[in-house]
Amino acid sequence: MTRLAEIVRRYPGAIVAVTLLVTAVCAVGLFRLTVDTSQRGFFPEGSPEVEALDRADEAFGGSDYILIAASSDDIFTPHGLQVLKDLTDALQDAEGVSSVMSPANMVEVRSAPWGLDVVEMLGEVPEPDDFDAAADVRRRMSESSMLSGILISEDGDHVLTLVQLGLDVDAGKVGGAVKRLVDDVSAASGLDFAVSGAPILNRSSEEHLIDDALTLLPAATAVIVGVLLLSFRTAAGVLLPLTTVLIGVVWVVGIMGLTGIPVNQISAVLPVVLLSTGSAYGIHMMHRYYEELHFGRPGDARDAGYVPVADGAAPRAVRSVGLAIVMAGVTTVAGFGSNVFSSIARMREFGLLAAMGVACALLISLTFLPAVLVLLERRGARAGVARAAGALGSLGVRPDASAGQRSGRHTATPSPNHNSKALAANRTASEQSSKLLANLGAAVLRRPAVVAVAVALLVAWSAVGLVRLQVDSDFASFFDARSVTRRDFDLIRREFGGVDTVQIIIEGDILEPAVLRAMETASLELQQVPGLGRVFSVVDVVKQVSLALHDNDPAWNRIPDTRDEAAQYLLLASFSGDLGLERMLSLDQTQARIQVMADSTMNAKAGGGTLDQARDIVGRRLAGVPGIDRVDITGLPLLGEAMGKQIVSSQFESLALAAVSVLAIIYLSLGRSWSTALCMAPIALTVLANFGLMGWTGLPVNLVTALVSSIAVGMGIDYSVHVYTRYTQNLAAGAAPRQAMLSTIVYTGQAVVVNAVSVAAGFIVTLTSKFPPVRQFGALISFTMAVSALGALTLLPVLLVAASERSMRKEGQP
Amino acid sequence: MIHISSTPGRLKIASYVLATALLLGAAAMAAAAPTAQEILDSVDVSGLLAGSGRALIELLVEKGKQAKVNRIEVYRYDDGKGTSRQMVEFLSPADVKGTKFLSIVEPGAEDQMWLYLPAVGRERRIAGSSAQGQFMGTDFTFEEISLNRSTWEQYTPSLLADRLVDGVLCHIVKLAPKSSGQSYSSLVLCVSKGDMNPVRIEFYGKGDKLQKVMTLSWDPQVIRLENVAAGSTTTVKVLEYDEGAVPDEVFTLRYLRK
């Protein structure tokens, strides 16, 4: 730190210039930022489910669908049918759309009295006043096995249009275009449509993300300005730490732009996280600077005729408080950084970027900030002693009358601790809080049993909550229950058994009757599983052709007996592209896909039972059947499930990693005593309480809230470290344990409370986020900051004092 | 394509499949600076789907890493007065070998299409509308496989600047639909200035989005249709052709069942 202080003293201009240059370069990156809110980025890379889905996409075209639902009463009128037909046509022409399945364009192979017919089920749209014809269309379609349960809900009340997106298209963009198209049709026709599916959720996420960016950053900045104003009440005190942390934000977000890392739902909160955590370092530095400014060189403050001594105050501040800031920063970096080994790319990315951002804020606070102070000091020095006070004024030491008076008074009765104007202004409040803290400290030390009981109760409460903890990997949870996005999602999920599909990919000799029969049996069983909806596959097409070729004789609603027969049925079916054969069977007929409508929220409620049953059916009915070489089960619900498991495992991994690295850091830097481990006690309590709260309040472990515990470890440890350091210093100065702790609680306690409150205040702005998980994240971080601060001021003192007294007894001291 | 001739009644079997090829035609050769209409007129389409004979054709459909190949044999009779008969028989792959389609078009009578699936063992009449989709499961629609003069008549031609198409200097004719309801918003026809053969046709959909590109080459006779929207390609290759008359008995239900 001495060397760093020396560098700051010698080359302040160079430091400022380099910092500004780097900032300018990074600022370029701000204009290259891209957004990616797709679900795929959340899934563990290289998992079998993702690989199977990629293969399926390649063989059958994209597996992204947009679902558009409308009420049957609206659609089955002459006007409604015309609207649906026009909408279907328009969708088919839309950029990025690969196919559209709607009751308006579905065809069926049908047996006619004179032979075989392939007909559009809708046929001609009825004349505007021919309601009977429209009712007839409704009856025909509701009875059709090709539509009922797929494009017409089981109860017949809703009609669905399925829009398949092409491969390698920007799903969010296509989703936005389709949504606009549907909105236009809706406005022009007066009919309501619900629109959902992964691309629509992507699109909404992007919009919310931009809203968040526009509100969260200014709100967090305002909160930080408020905290800085309360702490310093000076322009420099507000501007310098704020500039420091904003530069850090520009660096990290700029690097994202320059390296092409897109912004997503999680990393969108990065600026807020950095503002709240990173501003602490600048605050520490400024506090110390003001102290140094008034102390001057050792002994100066006690000199009669005190004048503020600016020269070298900033380097001295670096020397004295630098290590403490680095400690606080490094543990926070460890907390964020512990997520870099997560198997979920988005969590890894966030961990890395946040760690980098904190490190940047730390670096800037230790270099740029004091360098600017040095430059300002020199400007003051050049202006001459007479104007020194004026220059200092710009640093926040306003040479106004009251300050002069106060300086004078302080000269008469030197009281170094109260020389800072900012501190003086806060004195009353500070005295009050000191009294509170003194009472707290006394109570805690007098009745450690009360603390023990309170902690035990909290542990018990948390343990019970822990059992109720839920994991949520459902992408829909990123939307408010009352939002249009969620309302549409829920409607389609309810009426059509989900907006996602489970996909079973079969490789082998698909046309072998044994294979087709196995697929048929599996399909029938899958359809019975709660949480799964209609199943469709090439089996349906084969049976449909068989029926049509045999005069609709129900006995022929079956799989043919020979391979050739199946091949010839499918040849016939292939002449009519609208049967959607290419979505079910690969061109070379070696891969088939069974699609099952699935409600992923149902699976979560059934504790994974839905997908377990599906896997079981696939294992029993398809795997090992002669003619089937390989069978995979995949789809968004399975990816979501895999993600849920990964969230839990990475949660524990990163938590353990954060705990171990933080413990190592404090052990190495706090004098290598085993008692440093006691600092982990409030943190352990915090993590437990965090999960307990989540369990009791029903806040699920999701992609965002899973980050909380490791971050809490890295940030919350600071309070324990402050208390521990001050306490050992007091002991070393010869104080008895209880006395040493009481003074620690009174003096350090204030800093701990202020810091916890300001971090919590910074995070609380996320409560205005459009993403529920982000709001939960902010609330939980605020909660953990409160618990870890309280733990550091109650539990830790009791433990430390007990440990000291025990070791004293061992050593035979009274 | 395949030996287009302006003489009615002569064999033009392959032309059935390679319809567009007929654009070129033997008729009028280009004047020094022909108009769009003159270029269009110079492409003889009078014999499209007319003519008689036999052709052996390979249909290759490719999408991504996948491919399927069918071989078909086509027999055709056309009297040039509105009566045409056509038999398509699948030769491979083995599981569909023997599958046949017979279609009979006679003036004043309803079109008849018959299907025979050997595995089912009997013929079924199928509706004309069954054949409205893709031609034999390829990327070609029936409209595309049978582009003809009446197709052009629904569009207004205009001449664009000459350009090189696959190394061949071409007249470029843009065809804009005369009325709404056409499958395409425009077609761009590239006709070689050298021999007045069409070498490429681009099909544009709504918003002038390129949907399909048809490339034609003559030796060997190959038409390649790239379906831009679907990401697949169909290549039609004429392996053999024979302009000899086809016996009437080929176009009967008895032959269909054979």
Image: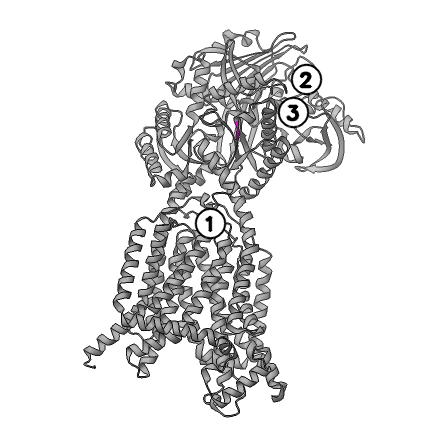
Chain bearing mark 1: A
Nearer the viewer's eye, disc 3 or disc 1? 1
**For the image shown, how many numbered marks are present on the structure?**
3
- With A42 as the anchor, is B20 left or right in this view? right
Q: Amino acid at mark 2?
A: Gly
Is label 3 in a helix, a strand or a loop? helix
Whether marks 3 and 2 lie on the same chain: yes
Front of the two marks 1 and 2: 1
Instruction: Provide the residue span drawn in magenta.
Output: A66-71
Residue drawn at x 58%, y 69% is A20
Dot 2 falls on which chain?
B
Q: Amino acid at mark 3?
A: Thr
Q: Main secondary structure of the magenta part?
A: strand
Specify few, some or many for label 2: CA neighbours under 10 Å numbering under 14, 14-19, or 20 or more.
Answer: many
Label 2's element?
loop
**Callout 1 secondary element:** helix
Splitting the image into 4 quarters, where does residue A561 fall? top left
Give the Cα distance between marks 3 and 1: 59 Å
Residue type beneath disc 1: Pro
Label 3 to label 2: alpha-carbon separation: 11 Å
Residue displayed at 35% across by 34% down: A614
Q: Is residue A749 above or below residue B212?
A: below
Residue designated by label 2: B47
Task: Indicate left or right for A76 with A555 as reference.
Answer: right
Q: How is the image coloured?
A: one colour
